[in-house]
Image (cartoon, rainbow, N blue to C red):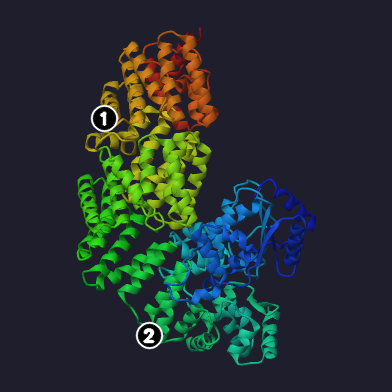
């Protein structure tokens, strides 16, 4: 049904040109093609050319290292690195690299094994590449990318997305219809032309996810989609059949293929003899099959084993290269395995358990050979799960623990460990289902408290803070006998409660958590409690204690792997953003970013990336904000859940709104708002505020007020006028003034100025004075308005927010026009225009440009047109339709219609004929 194009050999001259280009930009060349067309030969030629050119070469062959042999390809790449470079790495990274290269240490007890994960190794590789690039370009070369193990893929994908200069990837990829294939959706480079490839591939992971969602009307957790992709080889037909058969069950190693796919496999292998199928079963049962291993498991000679394998090779089932044996498509391996009798599979695994030495492989084989929970198998599984967790392979650790549970060794502790690993792997649905029995069967106490705590993290992640609060309160009740756990849970509960607008409860819990932490005398616990108290004080409209925040930073144990949401450094960075100290915030946030990167905490980088978006916007660095927004969406898609996706789309929509991409902003922000409302996320207000900002940007003030109406309705019930809770106020004031409701805008402006004066907030003082100026101008008090605008500009001098300053300059220019100071007005418009153009704020640049023209149709404040309204009025008067005007101005027809409604109201007219006469008089 699906035909895949055949690849072609890449000429060596093409490689030479590719390698030369590495000097100026990061690049990747993927050599796609079917078996036997010479990919590996070209790959070797590329390595030779790179070495002749003096490049640093890190090369590896991805020979079948599957999930239970994590890091195989990364270890081979790092083996080419000189010891002196490894010695210069940060301690955590150096330990991870050293531990990986000394593989015999991986079987040590969990408390002695080197702690590593994909993020740490990825951070280490980036550090190594940075060091190598100082002397020459770097080539990362991997042969047969389709066999890359998931853990190595995570590391290499991380590195590929973040290299900045003079680094190239040379990859071969087998994509013929009968060969193994793995999605390359994880491979990204910043350069537009960074990746060169020769042919189309089967669907990517994201493509498969979209196809499954569209055809079946449901989504699967990312780990499940990854496994579907692995088994289907990216073939959408195979993937849909697998997804239909799964229902709500996870895809396990023994999950049977649906009938349609099983028949396809049987057509290929059904004609083979029983002896050949027995050899294939052994091959399908091990992660890294070799001729010698298969021979030993079969109890046959190597010669006979080779003879049997060659029979299946001739049938197009496997390929033998050297002593390595590979199925030509993962679907064939899965079909051979699941089609065998359970008794046959157990016998094979029993033999293989005696042949392998690696802890995880042996434990897996023992478990798959067992029918009861014997102590030897359980001990092996527990040890293997600990090793997998320390090696940063949580999905594999969870599966090993679930094998133990499936054998009858079902305990609350194993379920908690398995759930924790599933959460780290991004499979929150499975984590929740595993935790439910642990909670139901456990007696009140510490164990059940931890289970509730874990489930609260799942609920907050997927359904928002309110759903998670119930479990946190249950965790708090069960933790009463453990003072440290009680203080930790109470701190988490306070953080969640304030995000759910439960201000009094959050304050009480935060104060109690701090008191308990002080009694215990645990520095990290005190640091987190102090930071969360400052966070809550700010959101509750109180000034936070700067001295206490400094103490929190001093006590923070940055070397510990504490949640970023309880990190004093991370919370301080966000507080600095909220209080308008954006330059200091940038320094603090970069320190948090560096710290997380050094220890490879990639998942927790979501906190950094989403806050970095707003910081970039406020500082006027829209390019950085856009990059962080892409990063936020990428991480959210990887993690899943309505809450986190609402955050990510809000951030991406924010960048689109400020850069003037009207359509993209509306799409993202409306979707974000829908998701946020579905889980009662606090980011619903931010998405609404940004939609209102977009409407103000295009002059659709009634639409802006409609969007803001729910927040304005509860204005008095939300304490304070902080940026985090009431950042929408400047847009609300401008919209109210524009539609003639300036009396309603007055208390909003007063609230901003009051907060600014009481807490010395530069943002509130600057925008508050600007808002007061607009209200005074609308009331006809031009002199007072001019004084307020001048005061706003003085406050802007200590506020590093160029967009806000330029926006205030537009108000200053309008005041100068009202006072008939044409040159002064045009100078202000021109300066604001220059700032908006430099920032890339297209909609506001058009407003500034339109404002620099004639004074306006009517000098009366209540009827004066904005720049955008005047432009639309002129176009309408010239005879253009709404759709034609929308195309001219790069906005939607509905936006044009909203503007025309405002124009008619302000000018006191009802038709385009009247508009033509009015605009004609204005032109004279």
The residues tagged by marks 2 and 1 sit, at their Cα atoms, a distance apart of 66 Å
The image shows residue 189 at horizontal and vertical percentages of 60, 50
Q: In the rendered view, does 419 fall on the left or right side of 750? A: right
The image shows residue 499 at horizontal and vertical percentages of 29, 47
State the SS at label 1.
helix
In front: 837, or 687? 837
Q: In the rendered view, does 800 fall on the left or right side of 54? A: left
Does the rendering let one see residue 619? yes
Q: Is residue 54 above or below residue 377?
A: above
Q: In the rendered view, does 84 fall on the left or right side of 874? A: right
Disc 2 versus disc 1: nearer the observer: 1
Q: Residues within 10 Å of mark 2 (few under 14, many from 20)?
A: some
Counting residues from the N terminus, which is met first, the one under dot 2 or under dot 1?
2
In front: 346, or 324? 324
Any mark on residue 373, and which? 2
Which residue bears the numbered disc 1? 758
Any mark on residue 94, and which? none
For the N terminus, which image quadrant? bottom right
Q: Is residue 334 above or below residue 691?
A: below
Does the rendering let one see residue 881? no
Q: Residues within 10 Å of mark 1 (few under 14, many from 20)?
A: few
Q: Is residue 908 above or below residue 843?
A: above
Q: Quadrant of residue 418?
A: bottom left
The image shows residue 692 at horizontal and vertical percentages of 38, 34
State the SS at label 2.
loop
Residue ID at (52%, 64%): 96
Residue ID at (41%, 42%): 670
Q: In the rendered view, does 551 fall on the left or right side of 596? A: left
The image shows residue 132 at horizontal and vertical percentages of 64, 54
């Amino acid at each position: 049904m699906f035909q895949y194009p055949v690849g072609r050999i890449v000429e060596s001259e093409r490689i030479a040109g590719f390698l030369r280009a590495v000097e100026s930009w990061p690049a990747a060349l993927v050599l796609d093609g079917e078996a036997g067309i010479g990919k590996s030969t070209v790959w070797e030629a590329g390595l030779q050319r790179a070495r002749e050119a003096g490049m640093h070469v890190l090369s590896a062959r991805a020979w079948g290292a599957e999930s239970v042999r994590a890091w195989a390809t990364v270890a081979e790449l790092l083996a080419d690195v000189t010891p002196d470079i490894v010695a210069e790495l940060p301690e955590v990274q150096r330990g991870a690299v050293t531990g990986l290269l000394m593989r015999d240490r991986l079987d040590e007890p969990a408390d002695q094994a080197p702690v590593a994960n994909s993020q740490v190794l990825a951070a280490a590789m980036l550090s190594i590449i940075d060091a190598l690039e100082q002397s020459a370009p770097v080539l990362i070369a991997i042969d047969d990318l389709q066999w890359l193990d998931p853990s190595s893929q995570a590391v290499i994908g991380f590195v590929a997305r973040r290299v900045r200069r003079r680094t190239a990837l040379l990859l071969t990829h087998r994509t013929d219809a009968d060969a193994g294939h793995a999605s390359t959706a994880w491979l990204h480079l910043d350069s537009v032309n960074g990746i060169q490839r020769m042919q189309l591939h089967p669907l990517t992971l994201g493509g498969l996810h979209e196809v499954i969602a569209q055809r079946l009307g449901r989504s699967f957790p990312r780990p499940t989609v990854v496994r579907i992709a692995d088994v289907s080889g990216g073939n959408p037909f195979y993937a849909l059949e697998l997804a239909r058969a799964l229902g709500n069950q996870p895809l396990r190693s023994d999950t049977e293929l649906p009938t349609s796919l099983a028949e396809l496999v049987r057509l290929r292998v059904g004609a083979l003899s029983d002896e050949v199928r027995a050899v294939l079963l052994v091959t399908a049962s091990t992660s890294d099959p070799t001729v010698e291993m298969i021979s030993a498991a079969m109890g046959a000679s190597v010669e006979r084993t080779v003879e049997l394998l060659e029979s299946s090779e001739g049938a197009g089932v496997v390929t033998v290269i050297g002593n390595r044996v590979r199925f030509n498509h993962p679907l064939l391996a899965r079909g051979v395995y699941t089609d065998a009798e359970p008794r046959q599979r157990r016998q094979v695994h029993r033999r293989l358990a005696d042949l392998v030495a690696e802890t995880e492989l042996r434990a897996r084989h023992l478990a798959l050979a067992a029918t009861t929970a014997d102590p030897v198998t359980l001990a092996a599984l527990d040890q293997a799960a600990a090793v997998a967790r320390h090696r940063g392979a949580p999905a594999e650790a969870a599966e090993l623990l679930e094998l133990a549970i499936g054998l009858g060794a079902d305990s609350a502790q194993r379920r908690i460990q398995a759930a924790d690993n599933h959460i780290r792997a991004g499979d929150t649905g499975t984590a929740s289902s595993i935790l439910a029995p642990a909670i139901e069967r456990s007696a009140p106490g510490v164990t059940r408290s931890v289970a509730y705590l874990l489930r609260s993290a799942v609920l907050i992640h997927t359904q928002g803070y309110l759903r998670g609060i119930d479990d946190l309160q249950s965790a708090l009740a069960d933790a009463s006998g453990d003072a440290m756990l009680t203080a930790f849970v109470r701190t988490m509960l306070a953080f969640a409660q304030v995000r759910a607008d439960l201000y009094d409860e959050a304050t009480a819990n935060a104060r109690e958590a701090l008191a308990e932490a002080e009694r215990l005398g645990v520095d990290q616990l005190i640091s987190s409690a102090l930071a969360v108290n400052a966070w809550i004080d700010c959101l509750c409209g109180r000034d936070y204690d700067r001295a206490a925040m400094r103490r929190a930073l001093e006590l923070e144990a940055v070397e510990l792997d504490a949640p970023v949401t309880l990190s004093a450094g991370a919370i301080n960075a966000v507080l600095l953003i909220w209080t308008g100290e954006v330059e200091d915030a940038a320094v603090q946030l970069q320190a948090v970013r560096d710290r997380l990167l050094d220890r490879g905490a990639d998942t927790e980088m979501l906190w950094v990336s989403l806050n970095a978006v707003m910081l970039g916007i406020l500082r006027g660095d829209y390019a950085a904000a856009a990059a962080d927004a892409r990063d936020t969406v990428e991480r959210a898609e990887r993690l899943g859940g309505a809450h986190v996706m609402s955050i990510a789309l809000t951030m991406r929509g924010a960048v689109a709104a400020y850069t003037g991409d009207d359509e993209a902003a509306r799409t993202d922000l409306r979707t974000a708002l829908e998701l946020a409302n579905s889980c009662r996320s606090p980011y619903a207000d931010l998405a609404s505020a940004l939609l209102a900002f977009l409407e103000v940007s295009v002059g659709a003030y009634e639409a802006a007020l409609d969007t803001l109406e729910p927040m304005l309705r509860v204005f008095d019930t939300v304490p304070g006028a902080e940026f985090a809770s009431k950042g929408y106020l400047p847009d609300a004031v401008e919209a109210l003034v524009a539609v003639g409701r300036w009396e309603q805008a007055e208390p909003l402006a007063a609230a901003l100025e009051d907060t600014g004066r009481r807490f010395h907030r530069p943002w509130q003082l600057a925008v508050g004075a600007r808002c007061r100026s607009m209200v005074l101008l609308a009331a006809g008090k031009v002199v007072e308005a001019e004084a307020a605008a001048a005061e706003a500009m003085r406050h802007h001098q200590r506020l590093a927010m160029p967009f806000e300053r330029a926006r205030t300059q537009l108000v200053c220019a309008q005041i100068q026009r009202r006072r008939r100071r044409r040159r002064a007005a045009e100078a202000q418009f021109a300066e604001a225009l220059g700032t908006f153009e430099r920032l890339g704020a297209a909609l506001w640049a058009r407003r500034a440009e339109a404002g620099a023209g004639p004074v306006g149709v009517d000098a009366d404040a209540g009827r004066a047109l904005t720049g955008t309204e005047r432009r639309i009025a002129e176009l309408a008067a010239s005879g253009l339709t709404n759709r034609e005007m929308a195309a001219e101005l790069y906005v939607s027809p509905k936006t044009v219609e909203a503007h025309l409604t405002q124009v008619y109201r302000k000018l006191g007219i009802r038709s385009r004929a009247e508009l033509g006469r009015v605009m004609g008089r204005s032109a004279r």
